[in-house]
Image: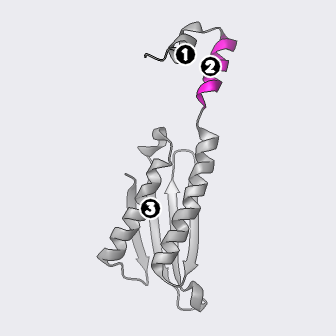
């Protein structure tokens, strides 16, 4: 589970909203690469902006800090629950892009092993019983 820090600017966070945010955004850890899960943490800032437009009054800003980068999403909506949903969807797609860039595929390992002349790695990967 991702370590989560909740902050409210001009907005009081009740227990119902806090549990909703933890349920919604803690599910993102299954998309994060396994090597990065230990050091990843999430910061969520909830803002009530009365000067904004009526449909963008409640703003949710979330930042996931990963070992080599940080992913950020900010969205305003009619209510706080809707803004949390939108931010979760945006972060999910950003994490998928991050994972595609920072993980190695097994077939690349086999090709590199062949090029380097390491047959012991190749046999371990091809043996289905191990």
| Earlier residue among tags 1 and 2 | 2
Q: Based on the displayed image, in which of its 4 quarters is residue 89 positioned? A: bottom right
What colouring method underlies this structural image?
Answer: one colour
Q: Quadrant of the C terminus?
A: top left
Q: Which residue is mark 3?
A: 25
Q: Which residue is mark 2?
A: 110
- Magenta-highlighted residues: 105-116
Q: CA distance from mark 3 to mark 2?
A: 35 Å
Q: Position of residue 8 (x, y in %)?
A: 41, 77
Image position of 52 with respect to 31: above or below? below
Residue sitting farthest toward the right: 115
Considering the numbered disc 1 on the image, is that residue within a helix, a strand or a loop?
Answer: helix
Residue at x 61%, y 90% (from the top left corner): 53
Q: Position of residue 29 (x, y in %)?
A: 45, 51
Residue at x 59%, y 8% (from the top left corner): 119
**Residue 46 in the figure: left or right of residue 18:** right
Q: Position of residue 18 (x, y in %)?
A: 35, 71
Q: Is residue 5 visible?
A: no
Label placed on residue 28: none
Indicate whether residue 24 is drawn in magenta.
Answer: no
Considering the numbered disc 2 on the image, is that residue within a helix, a strand or a loop?
Answer: helix
Residue sitting farthest toward the front: 128
Cβ–Cβ under 8 Å for marks 1 and 2? yes
Q: CA distance from mark 1 to mark 2?
A: 9 Å
Q: Which residue is mark 1?
A: 126
Q: Based on the displayed image, in which of its 4 quarters is residue 16 positioned? A: bottom left
Considering the numbered disc 3 on the image, is that residue within a helix, a strand or a loop?
Answer: helix
Q: CA distance from mark 1 to mark 3?
A: 37 Å
Crowd band around label 1 with a 10 angstrom C-alpha radius: few (<14), some (14–19), many (20+)? few
């Amino acid at each position: 589970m991702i370590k989560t820090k909740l902050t409210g600017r001009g907005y009081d966070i009740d227990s119902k909203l806090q549990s909703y945010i933890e349920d919604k955004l803690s599910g993102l850890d299954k998309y994060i690469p396994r090597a990065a899960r230990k050091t990843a943490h999430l910061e969520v800032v909830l803002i009530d902006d009365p000067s904004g437009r009526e449909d963008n009054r409640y703003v949710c800003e979330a930042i996931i800090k990963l070992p080599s980068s940080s992913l950020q999403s900010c969205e305003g909506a009619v209510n706080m629950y809707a803004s949390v949903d939108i931010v979760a969807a945006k972060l999910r797609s950003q994490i998928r892009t991050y994972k595609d860039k920072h993980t190695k595929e097994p077939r690349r390992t086999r090709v590199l092993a062949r090029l380097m002349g390491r047959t012991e790695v190749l046999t371990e990967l091809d043996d289905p019983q191990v």
